[in-house]
Amino acid sequence: QLQLQESGPGLVKPSETLSLLCTVSGGSIDSSSYYWGWIRQPPGKGLEWIGNIYYIGNTYYNPSLKSRITISVDTSKNQFSLKLNSATATDTAVYYCARWRRGTNHFDYWGQGTLVTVSS
Amino acid sequence: QSVLTQPPSVSGAPGQRVTISCTGSSSNIGANFEVHWYQQLPGTAPKLLIYDNNNRPSGVPDRFSGSKSGTSASLAITGLQAEDEADYYCQSYDGSLSGVVFGGGTKLTVL
């Protein structure tokens, strides 16, 4: 059974970089059938797509966040990561990593999520 | 504001049927991109409920069904149960934005 697990600091100071890691187990990240993505959910609000990455490094970002985010992949560790710079309080959210099925364009497996608070 | 529009809330009594709408535009649902639905139980991660407009992943009861027409889609839940109380999100792809789009979410209350 595929599992995804987010990890990283739960508290980030304003203007600093938010960094998260997603570790994939029970399956290989270098499958040609999938992308790997990040989604976030501010407290009490809806879901917002952040971006996706393919195992060879191709990335697709939300245009509204594109200038501040970098998603990268490490196939040797079966992990992918998110960096969001110049964090502000509006970036406070539960961050999810998920597997994106190519072709049909949906997320079929999700991590449990990790809350990141941006505050001094 | 979300690119896909959903009602903020719906409700129904146990055993009843409810529907949740998801309205898009000619650059997403109307452009023939598939619609998918997720169920988010309180305090948990979203779970895929319906994919490709009307397909259920293994383990999802057939009480849940999806449909799509024009620039809109719908999720129907029949035989409503207390355990169905959750937030529901629709999702598609937008060709103009070149990205994934979600609806704002609908809170289902089982009376």
Image: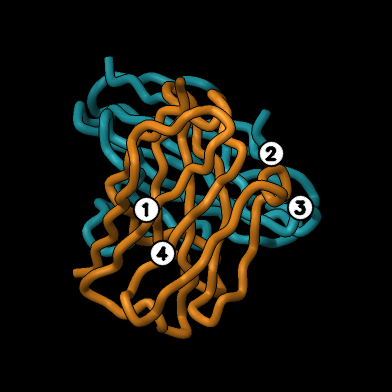
Chain colours: A orange, B cyan
Q: Identify residue for label 2.
A: B3
Q: Which of pointers 1 and 4 indicates the residue nearer the eye? A: 4
SS at badge 1: strand
Tag 1: residue type? Leu
The correct choice, above or below, for B13 with respect to A81 in the image is: above
Which SS class for mark 2? Answer: loop
Instruction: For the N terminus of chain B, give its image quadrant.
Output: top right
Mark 1 crowdedness (10 Å alpha carbons): few <14, some 14-19, many ≥20:
many
Disc 3 target residue = B97
Residue under circle 4? A99
* Measured Cα–Cα span from mark 3 to mark 1: 23 Å
Quarter of the C terminus of chain B within the rendering:
top left
Q: Earlier in the sequence, mark 2 or mark 3?
A: 2
The residue identified by callout 1 is B48
Using the image, name the chain to which the residue with label 2 belongs.
B
The residue under label 3 is which amino acid type?
Leu
